[in-house]
């Protein structure tokens, strides 16, 4: 037994709880937004044409990302002709399957 420690009671066994987790980091990616839900007979032009996305999560998962794993989606459902200010959504189904919690942020 290390110096300075003593056993209390008759049982010299000790239970130790340890939590191990992956190192968290962030990565910045420039992604082109994907249009979804554009009505028939309409066309759309998005500006800007690239969005900076900052992804946070475990290093192995971020390192394993392939092109197309993360998308920035702009929902155009039920929009007619006009000019709109919309908030894009970051979509990554791969992460949700892992059961872990991740964060992402968009910068226009």
Image (tube, rainbow, N blue to C red):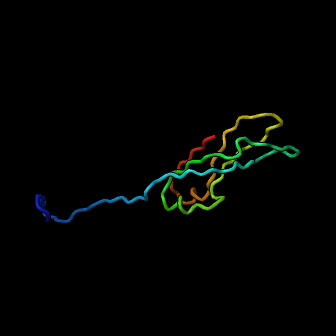
* Residue beneath the point at 32% across and 59% down: 18
Residue 98 x %, y %: 54, 60
Residue 107 x %, y %: 60, 41
Image side of residue 69 versus residue 58, left or right: right
Quadrant into which the C terminus falls: top right
Quadrant into which the N terminus falls: bottom left
Q: Residue furthest right?
A: 41
> Observer-nearest residue: 18 or 80?
80
Residue 67 x %, y %: 64, 60
> Observer-nearest residue: 14 or 10?
14
The number of numbered discs placed on residues in the rendered structure image is 0
Q: Is residue 108 positioned above or below 60 on the image? A: above
Residue 100 x %, y %: 51, 56
Image side of residue 1 versus residue 33, left or right: left
* Residue beneath the point at 59% across and 51% down: 29
Image side of residue 105 versus residue 11, left or right: right
* Residue beneath the point at 56% across and 50% down: 28
* Residue beneath the point at 61% across and 62% down: 66
């Amino acid at each position: 037994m290390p110096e300075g420690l003593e056993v209390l009671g008759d049982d010299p066994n000790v239970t130790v709880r340890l939590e191990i987790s992956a190192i968290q980091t962030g990565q910045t990616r420039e992604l082109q937004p994907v249009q979804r839900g554009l009505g028939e007979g309409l066309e759309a032009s998005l500006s800007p044409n690239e969005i900076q996305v900052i992804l946070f999560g475990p290093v192995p998962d971020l390192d394993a990302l392939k092109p197309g794993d993360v998308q920035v989606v702009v929902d155009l459902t039920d929009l007619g002709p006009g000019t709109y200010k919309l908030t894009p959504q970051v979509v990554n189904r791969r992460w949700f399957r892992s059961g872990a919690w991740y964060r992402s942020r968009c910068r226009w």
